[in-house]
Amino acid sequence: MAQSTAVLNKNQNIDPLFEHAEEREKVERSLLKKLDGRMYLLGVIYILNYIDRQNIAVARLRGFEEDLGLQGSQYATCLGIVYVGYLLTQVPSNMCLEYVGRPSMYLSSCMVLWGFVSMLTGAARSFYDVLIARFCLGFVEAAFFPGALLLISKWYKRDEIGQRTAYLANGLLIANATGSILASGILEVMDNAYGIAAWRWLFFIEGALTISVAMCAMYILPDFPKTSSGWLSAAEQAVAIRRAQEEYTVGDSPVHPFKGLWLAISDKKVWSLAIILGLHAFSSSFHIYFPTLMQTIGYDPIFTLLICVPPWLTAIVAVNIVTRHSDRSSERYWHITASMGIALVGYVVAISTMNPVVRYISFFFMTQIHAGYVCFMAWASTSVSDPPSKRASALALINTGGVLANIFVPYAWPLSWGPDYSKSFGICIFANVLTVTACWVFRKHLITLNNIAKPTVLAGRQRKEDQYQL
């Protein structure tokens, strides 16, 4: 068998592992089919990740603050403290994941822990109990999202990442929809069951569900191409390794995780992307308070949760359409800008009126911002070069920009600014404009880098993929 570092012959377009190009294509199709079947579980995990992090917003509708005696900004602090745990854990977690090379066990173990912490939140008796539980929740939840992005980047090519990132991000959107349905059912059925408040049951049941799925994930999630075994044929694994080497070729010498961290820290693109993601977090901050905003229309808590569903279902459709087109056209900036522009219309409409029908329609516009978010994360994943240890740290650092912003985001939505929340939406508008502007500056920088970069030629084959996507 030829060396795994071999690449496609330019003239014959034949992989040395196979006699005919059609043979590799057949194996590659089989590989992607198997891989996608397992990667879909990342979306399910993201649903539970988001639900366990945001069920506090649903609990607020059924006496959470009153039972714990929360006052002033204490609720906002409970929301924000979870991201302090994220801030401390994400970078070292991704470095550890790159070193261990076993996402199936690593990510699933973290999932068990955050499910357990979520259940403990339901037993809280005071503000400080919730504060400690929420901090610990963020500490263990932080491993998942940057780890999932790293896992995707290990298996897929640049023109495949956008759609796969969309499958992952759909978990967040589905969580906003199905999470409301699940929560409304729990709150209705378990209200004061066995003398326990409904909001406590919410944490108990959803935490237990997370632990159950984590047990299955240990056997379903793939590891990295070189460490996966049992579900791929020898030919499929060889092609998986080859695809990664063709896409991100840096030689065979591994780079120590701390060296990779330094390379990520010294890359200006990483910090630019982190700043953009932080601005985007403020622009899309409405989703953290979505049930509260929906309640301003004037319905009871259960019906409020149910009408939260349609705007997020619409967003799921938009995300899949936009990201698929973005992948096919290898373009990111204008797709991001279009989504941000539609959300901007929603913010302006929400500020302009308290009419229930018009305000409800504005939420459909707002949720479209998540299509831009998915395109941005795909852009970030393909804008950071090798080695793999650098990419692992870079993705975590970029996501840290959004996490840092999320610590302060809850304070932009105080109850005293309700029910119209015009000041809060004003902050979203300002952040929206800054995000689009920052993306434009970043795009101009990539154009400059593309113009000065020399084409990379590997074994006689020029790789136009080395050009940054715009």
Image: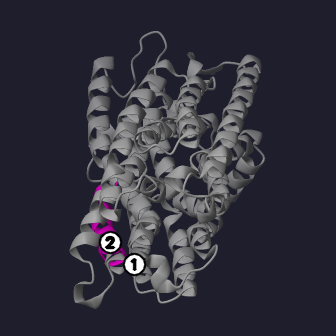
The dot on residue 116 is 1
Where is 357 relative to 445, above or below? below
To which residue does mark 2 refer? 211
Which amino acid type is marked by label 1?
Answer: Phe
Which amino acid type is marked by label 2?
Answer: Ile
Q: Is residue 169 visible?
A: yes
Secondary element type, mark 1: helix
In the foreground, 393 or 299: 299
Instruction: Quadrant for the C terminus, please.
Output: top right
In the foreground, 239 or 170: 170
Q: Check contact, mark 1 vs mark 2: CB within 8 A.
A: yes
Specify whether 322 is left or right of 347: left
Q: Dot 2 surroundings within 10 Å: few (below 14), some, or many (20 or more)?
A: many
In the foreground, 330 or 243: 330
Secondary element type, mark 2: helix
Instruction: Quadrant for the N terminus, please.
Output: top left
Where is 178 relative to 439, above or below? below
Q: Residue at x 24, y 77 (%)?
A: 190
Q: Quadrant of residue 379?
A: top right
- Span colored in magenta: 202-221
